[in-house]
Image: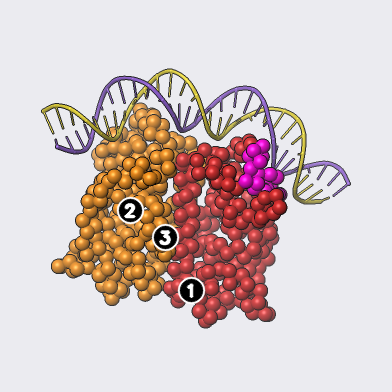
Chain colours: A orange, B red, C purple, D yellow
Amino acid sequence: MVLELDPLSKRLNTSSSKHIGAAKQPGVTTNHVLDRVPLFTILSRQNRERVLKTLSETRYGKHDLIFREGEPSEYFHIVKEGTVKCVKSTPDGKECTLKMLMPGDLFCCDAAAFDGARHPGTAQPMGEVSILRMPKSAYFDMLRRSPDAAIEVIKYLSNRLHEAQEQNKILALDRADQRLAALLTDLGTRSGIQERHGLRLPLRLTRQDMANMVGATTETVIRIMSRFKRERLVAGTANRLVILNLQKLKALASG
Amino acid sequence: MVLELDPLSKRLNTSSSKHIGAAKQPGVTTNHVLDRVPLFTILSRQNRERVLKTLSETRYGKHDLIFREGEPSEYFHIVKEGTVKCVKSTPDGKECTLKMLMPGDLFCCDAAAFDGARHPGTAQPMGEVSILRMPKSAYFDMLRRSPDAAIEVIKYLSNRLHEAQEQNKILALDRADQRLAALLTDLGTRSGIQERHGLRLPLRLTRQDMANMVGATTETVIRIMSRFKRERLVAGTANRLVILNLQKLKALASG
DNA sequence: TCAAAAACATGATATTAGTCATGTTTTTCT
DNA sequence: AGAAAAACATGACTAATATCATGTTTTTGA
């Protein structure tokens, strides 16, 4: 009955899936992506072929969910195209966005490692996305065959842990405007595209999205963004968000 | 010059160290501890002997630091006895405690995995502690020889990441009293000792310590603890902190 | 053991951010 | 293109928490 109340649960998954290891031109479409994922580039030719056979690709639209918090985890995932947000919710409808996953990002490299583990959050596309996935058993098999792959996963998880701890510090110690400045700085640096007038974020991002990422209400984020706009630090709204002064934002973020 | 201002930097490390692999009665003292660390119990006899040779044990007192934020990471560590807190600080002296590490906890299983990586936080004993450590190269060697060890580390890091993400959600969405209730619930469940009058925390924990863990000021935590005391949810102060009503604290924590 | 330091406590006040209400602008979908 | 929905915006008010001040109690260490 909790699910009945959940607005997300009405969504239908309209995704389409195919086994890419069985593609007619083996490796052509796929290798381009795999070559950008350190985890796969370090595999031996033999192991890479083996892994390819177990990978499948699925596309999701904006209104699909890849999986929901609390569901059992059966696959190891990799973002191929697009952006996926990882969200935790409370029973009363508040949301907290933990991470924006970009192409090359692994997910469920963790939950997948436990038998019967439940997803700690919901994975939701920010638009059209393409996801590669591998059954849990094949993932374990890969880790056992290739110590280098396991070490790559350790490195990836370490980075994620450091990120989460840094975010912890920010949430614990900084004001809302500093947290927002830190978010914009991070997104700008990580994925911003340099344009004539500033650094554009290649991602639709509403004030609400930002609020869920910095632990504030939508109104608070709107007010702060209005201020940032007046101070010529940013410009635009969700569909076209541009950072005009990364330096000042960075300075504000670090106190 | 930043270090000059850091009150922590005046502390001397008065620790004593010894190679436990070279102990006169090999394995006697050590195996008791190692048997509680999943990472070691899954090793083959041969690998375990090899690992033992590279481990050394160091004791630290309350006023020592095991390592400081920003220092290069050269070892993989395991808590043998006592509690270690993992802290991040801001230039203006504010602190955020990320994690209390208990016996069996691994640390720098992450930072150690990168060449020349810096410690993302400071490791500070909460009293007398005993730490096992292994040089980075031996740690890598272990991971390469034993896929099971690597998988154990992946599992450990996954748990740490989930904890950090849960804490993220709590910091982003909950009030100070709920955050404190969540902390007490967690510590009580994880390490509390059942006594006649309630669940005692086997750990000196000041209001200040708690404040650093829940992202609040000391005064705020004192006020909330005073209220919890009036409501008979907790009793005592730092040296002897007792949880009287775990259920109500748990209920408060989850809204 | 006893003085100093640290921890605990509480009040007054200021700041920050949330809540609720209302209206405008932009985007989406058919 | 045009209606509906979503996003953006701002004001008034309230709630939560920080800050500063001051005093008491407990713990620590020589």
Question: CB of mark 3 within 8 Å of CB of mark 1?
Answer: no
**Residue at image location 40% in from the left, 42% down from the top:** A95
Query: Residue under mark 2: which chain is it in?
Result: A
Q: Which mark is residue A117?
A: 3
B126 over B15 or under it: above or below: above
Measure how far apart labels 3 and 1 are at the Cα level: 27 Å
Question: CB of mark 1 within 8 Å of CB of mark 2?
Answer: no
Q: Which residue is mark 1?
A: B142
Q: Is residue B233 visible to us here?
A: yes
Question: CB of mark 2 within 8 Å of CB of mark 3?
Answer: no
Q: Is residue A140 left or right of residue D24?
A: left
Viewer-nearest of labels 3 and 1?
Answer: 3
Q: Position of residue B172 (x, y in %)?
A: 46, 42
Asked if badge 2 and badge 3 are on a common chain, one would say yes
User: Outermost residue toward the bottom?
Assistant: B46
Q: Position of residue A129 (x, y in %)?
A: 25, 52
Measure how far apart labels 1 and 2 are at the Cα level: 35 Å
Q: Secondary structure at mark 1?
A: helix
Is A237 or B165 nearer to us in this picture? Answer: B165
Q: Is residue B239 magenta?
A: yes
Q: Which mark is residue A67?
A: 2
Q: Position of residue A34 (x, y in %)?
A: 27, 63
Instruction: Using a 10 Å C-alpha cutoff, classify the residue at mark 2 as few (fewer than 14 neighbours), some (14 to 19) or many (20 or more).
Output: some
Measure how far apart labels 2 and 3 are at the Cα level: 13 Å
Q: Is residue B4 visible to us here?
A: no
Labels in figure, total = 3
Report which quarter residue A180 is drawn in.
top left
Q: Which region of the structure is painted magenta?
A: B228-245
Q: Amino acid at mark 3?
A: Ala
Q: Amino acid at mark 1?
A: Met
Q: Position of residue B252 (x, y in %)?
A: 54, 41
**Residue at image location 60% in from the left, 62% down from the top:** B103
